[in-house]
Amino acid sequence: MWRLTPGQALACREWDGEAVLYNDLSGSTHLLDGAALDLLHALRDEPADAARLAIRLADRFDADGADLAGAIGEMLAALAGLDLIEPC
Amino acid sequence: MLTVGMLASAELRARLSGAGLVLRTGPFTNLIRSDVPHLIDTVALMYADYPVEPDGGFADFHLDYRRARGPRRWFRPQVHFAYDGSTPFQPLPLAQAYPMLEWTMNWCVSHRAHGYLIIHAAVLEKHGRGIILPAPPGSGKSTLTAALLGHGWRLLSDEMTLVRPADAMLVPVPRPVSLKNASIDVIRAFCPDAILSRPVEETTKGTIAHVKAPRDSILRAAEPARAACVVFPRYEAGAGLALTPLPKARAFMELADNCFNYQVLGAHGFAALGQLIDTSDAYTFRYSNLPEAMDLFERLALGAA
């Protein structure tokens, strides 16, 4: 299970499918694609794992099944590397 | 309003070598002292249209430029800079006193004025549309800026774009435009009416000359502008004109990289830059021909590029 790292306010701006996000913990700014931002917003609503996120976001990503869960797992690992999310 | 140009030469010299000249540049007051004769003459030329504030009032920056004493007064003479009584930089050859004044005035703003988000970029305005030109040295930014000033553009700054965090408006701090090496003769030929300072050779940046800011830009220094475009220019000898849209999120990241104090301002800086990008179109721009560039910028000013 993953959750948004406490202290992250997700201050972001999105234009044309790309987003910039301010990391409240590191002070860095990240360039993200819209899908990563969707994952962060979903985890702000409630903690989830990759399989659950794949079900919730299947329509948004226009995909489903194991491939989507695998791709989401990779994105979650990358977001965790930026301290935006953490295991729970 | 008292301006530097209204002061008799002896009065200007007396102020600079005495209690100091309180010079207003945009939102800042600079208390300048100096005993370097050619620096005083160049200030008289380049800052003639700038307001002089009353003696004894508050000054944001206290700047002191003095001839070296001892042997350095005569042998390879030098100029020393002091800021608020401290000496943050090594002395320079005396002939470089005026470039030193410009560089150190920039340094004061970029290191102290954290009430603004400060982007290392030129910024101009025409027809109510502000255009920001961020670029590394050698990109032709200052040449382009000096050329645009001869075509009805208002100078907000050649070096530092001040963004007001509350509303992302661009706050002018119009000062002389710095030209390097071949650009000096390019602008002399392209803008014969431009007033240039005497070129100073063998600086760390090569030969340097400054273009006086247009009088109208100085008179309108209290009028902020709304950003309409962010244009990343690149001079490339012989290249055709090319204006290419840049996705806004990428423009945001490039601008953040070009800020002096983005990290200092934290979330406030992020919010200000986001607001600025919201109202702006972003482009990369390649050019080699100044008249073509002038035509394209006129279209940008009209919102018709």
Image (cartoon, helix red, strand yellow):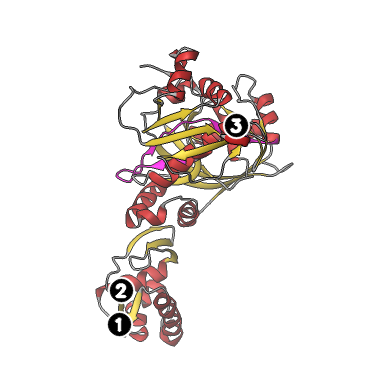
**Chain letter of disc 1 in the image:** A
| Above/below status of B198 relative to A52 | above
Left or right placement of residue B8 versus residue B59 in this view: right
Q: Residue B8: image x %, image y %?
A: 47, 12
Q: Residue at x 70, y 29 (%)?
A: B185
Q: What residue did someone put label 2 on?
A: A42
The answer to whether residue B189 is visible is yes
Q: Residue A71: image x %, image y %?
A: 45, 81
Say what amino acid the circle numbered 1 marks: Ala
**Chain letter of disc 3 in the image:** B
Q: Are marks 2 and 1 in contact (CB under 8 Å)?
A: yes
Q: Secondary structure at mark 1?
A: loop
Say what amino acid the circle numbered 3 marks: Met
**Are labels 3 and 2 assigned to the same chain?**
no
Q: Residue at x 44, y 66 (%)?
A: A32
Q: Which of pointers 2 and 1 lies earlier in the amino acid sequence? A: 2
Say what amino acid the circle numbered 2 marks: Ala
For the residues marked 3 and 2, what is the alpha-carbon distance in whole angstroms? 48 Å
Q: Quadrant of residue A22?
A: bottom left
Q: Residues within 10 Å of mark 3 (few under 14, many from 20)?
A: some
Give the magenta part as a residue range. Answer: B160-181
Q: Residues within 10 Å of mark 1 (few under 14, many from 20)?
A: many
Q: What residue did someone put label 1 on?
A: A48
Q: Residue at x 31, y 70 (%)?
A: A41
